[in-house]
Structure formats: C-alpha cells, structure tokens
Amino acid sequence: MESWKRKLRMGMVGGGQGAFIGGVHRIAATLDQQTELVAGCFSQSYENTKLTGAQLYLDPARGTRSSATRANSFAPARWGRCARSSSSTCRIS
C-alpha cells in the first residue's frame, strides 16, 4: 500500500473509560499506521473525556465537552455546523 503524504488526523466521539468498543475502534483505525488520534469527546461526562484523553497522551485542549463543539471547530464553513442530537452524536445541519 502506498503511504499518504501525512497521517489522517482522527477525532473520536464516544469510547471513553468503561466503553470496551472504543479501544477496539482506536486499535482498528491505527492498524496501518496511517491514522493518528488527535482529539475527542469520549463521553457525556467531561471528567471521563479528560481522563481518557490524558491516558491516550492527547493535548488537553483537544478534549471537548460536546461532539458538536469539536466538529464545529474543525469543519469548514461550507459543511455547515453540527447540531447536538438527542443521541449525543453529531449531524451536519
């Protein structure tokens, strides 16, 4: 497989402490060493998000209180803005 010019920078929603599947997704996403986890909103609990981010050696400024906040900080204006849904996932509005 041909390597990209740089790694894909990934943000994650969910998968914080106590969520088994989060670790599985992080491992799968980085198997080819082409992806790097750089940000996340790992839980509805901001304390859990901060703890998970610290355990993953992420910059503390990269853990946010809501997935909509994180998505809006990265999304180009042409994509619109994310609105928080009842399932705490992010949808483009």
Image (spheres, helix red, strand yellow):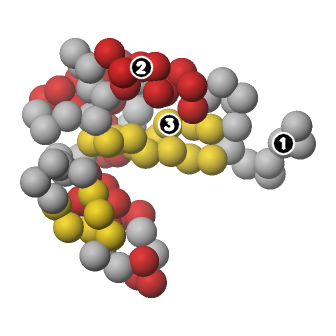
Q: Are marks 1 and 2 in contact (CB under 8 Å)?
A: no
Question: In the rendered image, which quarter is residue 52 located in?
Answer: top left
Question: In the rendered image, which quarter is residue 47 located in?
Answer: top left
Q: Nearer the viewer, residue 55 or 11?
A: 11
In the rendered structure, which amino acid carries the disc numbered 3? Leu
> Label 3 belongs to which residue?
37
Q: Label 3 vs label 2: CA separation? A: 12 Å
Residue at 16% of width from left, 61% of height from top?
A: 84
Residue at 10% of width from left, 54% of height from top?
A: 86
Q: Are marks 3 and 1 in contact (CB under 8 Å)?
A: no
Residue 8 pos. (x, y %): 63, 47
Q: Label 1 vs label 2: CA separation? A: 24 Å
- Eyeballing the image, is 17 above or below 62? above
In the rendered structure, which amino acid carries the disc numbered 2? Gly
Q: Is residue 56 left or right of residue 8?
A: left
- Eyeballing the image, is 64 above or below 93? above
Q: Quadrant of the image for the N terminus?
A: top right
> Label 1 belongs to which residue?
3
Q: Is residue 45 left or right of residue 90?
A: left
Give the numbered dot on residue 49. Answer: none
Looking at the image, can residue 12 be seen? yes
Q: Nearer the viewer, mark 1 or mark 2?
A: 2
> Label 2 belongs to which residue?
23
